[in-house]
Image: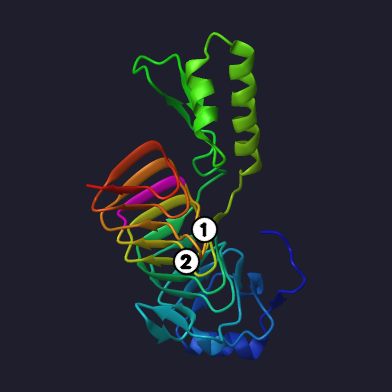
Amino acid sequence: MAEDLSWRQLAPDEVRVLEAGGSQAEDWSRIRVAPGFRPETVSRCRLSGAVRLGAFRSPAILHGIPIPSGVRDSRLHDATVHDDALVEQVGLLSRCAVGPGAVLWRCEAIVQDGESSYGNGVLLDVLNEGGGRPLRLCEPLSAPHAYLAACYRHRPRLGEALDRMAATYAASRRSREATIGPQAQILQCGLLQAMRIGPAARVIGARHLANGTVVSSPAAPACIGHGVEAEDFLLLEGSAVESGAQLSRCFVGQGCRIGR
């Protein structure tokens, strides 16, 4: 976790308030907090590694109901929770940064182990099930790019250039820390591994998501619904995957609807 001078160590009286509220840490000296942090907003938590906690002043909105923001009944390891977010009943939040105003509620685990490009750089074999027409996923992928990469195999230098562009983009997205964007909501989910979830996204009841990116914005939020399982995927703005759909090595473009 990069050092940031705006985060400070806990004062001894803050540690006492946290312990009185049922929280424990392997090493309180590794916990950093933002200006305006109030220790009473964190309760019954287990903290390990380098953890950063924001100032929880404004309520989070859950199912249309304002709920005090903060961190409760959760385990955090090498994690950052920014201002006014809510993390409640999360079994493990590890190597993940939670954006301002985001809500994580009743989730099994949101974790990352090692580096990931979050679905970028994954190779697909398209058109021919036997292979020979590889296409490398990346968030800026367009229909013309995909067509040229898959159908112009007789132009090897063109194919190599297109693949190099996608690989360069994938390398630029590599990180050791998963991210949950501002105002995103992750509710009643199973295991999320190596995920980058954009602002205002809604992930509700997903069973298992791994090595993926959910591109989202307040103007065009992306959604993942109940029972969904997805790995090695990219999901763009305004799209929805729901009703127990299963995705593997897949690019879902803007405004798509996938179910069952």
- The answer to which image quadrant residue 145 occupies is top right
**Residue 10, position as x, y percentages in the image:** 66, 81
- Residue nearer the viewer, 82 or 215: 215
Q: Which mark is residue 184?
A: 2
Instruction: Identify the residue shown where x is 71% and y is 74%.
Output: 7
Give the vertical position of 131 relative to 254 (above or below): above
Give the vertical position of 175 relative to 125 (above or below): below
**Residue 220, position as x, y percentages in the image:** 47, 60
Q: In this picture, which residue range is highlighted in magenta?
A: 206-212
Q: Main secondary structure of the magenta part?
A: strand
- Element carrying mark 2: loop
Instruction: Identify the residue shown where x is 46% and y is 17%.
Output: 133
Separation of disc 1 and disc 2 at Cα?
A: 7 Å
Give the vertical position of 71 relative to 151 (above or below): below
**Residue 98, position as x, y percentages in the image:** 54, 66
| Residue 149 located within the stretch drawn in magenta | no
On screen, residue 41 versus residue 44, left or right, reads: right
- The answer to which image quadrant residue 192 occupies is bottom left
Question: From where the camera sits, is residue 136 visible?
Answer: no
Which amino acid type is marked by label 2? Ala
Report the residue marked by disc 1.
Answer: 198
Q: Are marks 1 and 2 in contact (CB under 8 Å)?
A: yes
